[in-house]
Amino acid sequence: MNTREELMDLLDQVKRQLINNQEIGLDAPILSANSLNYLRKGLQLDKEALKENFYCNNLEELENFISTCDQCKLSKERKNIVFGEGPPDARLVFVGEAPGVDEDLAGKPFVGQAGKLLTDIIKAMGLTRDEVYICNIVKCHPPHNRDPEQDEIKMCLPFLEAQISLIKPEIICAIGRISAQSLVHKDFKITRDRGQWQSFKGIPLMPTYHPAYLLRYPQAKRSVWEDMQEIMKKLGLKDPRGLSD
Ligand code: SF4
């Protein structure tokens, strides 16, 4: 055996050991994203068993890891995976529910009408889009703009958790019902519970209305602005219009 063959043989044994461990009910090991990708290639290993057991060193590695993801049925019709964008050390992360049609085509989050409104909200806070991180609960566009389903959220949420743990923001803003229900509690009611501080993995989280809702119900803009002022206070930002204390 040459060195390459020895290495391939060793890898094959590792794969077999993983399958055996899985069969006798042992937890899957924590692997780097690259190792996990490698092991999954051509392997009859249950993806479900390994899906949460990965680590990435940075956002780039995580994005690369997700780039071929087919863990849920949303992979079938998507044009692009919408990973998210913003500085890797953003103090504030906005989390929406799922990419829409425009986002699916552009591969970027919040680029449609609702995205323009979100950009205006960010500006009103005295920030720019370049200073915040924007992403979604699921990374692929649900067909016909339907809500993402529970199994899709369950499969995709570990990616968002990894994203958040790499960014380590001071505050998360959950945008809309689905986002708040996924990050806070499944019984979360956006009309009843928005505007009240929650927490996700120990990070303060402010739930607010989705900009798409504001396009339909502009009278809700005042509530969103109150929620943004709460965030600004926590971040130590002054109201650029001098309207808050
Ligand atoms: S929505 Fe998430 S879990 Fe489903 S295919 Fe896209 S990246 Fe993978």
Image: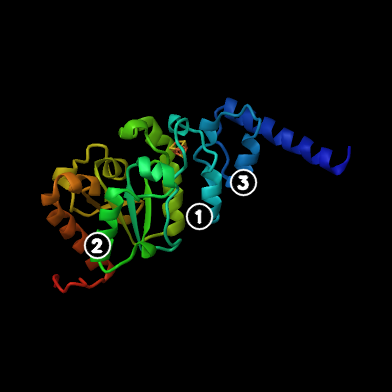
Task: Please say if 133 is above or below 77.
Answer: below
Label 1 neighbourhood size at 10 Å, few (<14), some (14-19), many (20+)? many
Under mark 2, the amino acid is Ile
| Residue at position x 77%, y 37% in the image | 8
Q: Residue at x 45, y 45 (%)?
A: 159
| 184 and 147: which is toward the camera | 147
Q: Secondary structure at mark 3?
A: helix
Judging by the rendered image, the residue that carries numbered circle 1 is 59
The residue under label 1 is which amino acid type? Leu
Q: Is residue 200 placed above or below 185 in the rendered structure?
A: below
Taking depth in this image into account, of 228 and 220 the one nearest to the observer is 220
Which of the 4 image quadrants contains residue 188? top left
Give me the disc on residue 34.
Answer: 3
Q: CA distance from mark 1 to mark 3?
A: 13 Å
Label drawn at residue 231: 2
Residue 142 x/y as whole percent? 37, 34
Query: Which amino acid type corresponds to the residue marked 3 in the rendered image?
Result: Asn
Q: Residue furthest right?
A: 1
Image x and y of residue 167, in percent: 43, 58
Residue depicted at 45% across the width and 48% down the height:
83
In this view of the protein, which residue sits in the foreground, 89 or 48? 89
Q: Are marks 2 and 3 in contact (CB under 8 Å)?
A: no
Q: Describe residue 117's horizontal placement relative to residue 68 as left or right.
A: left
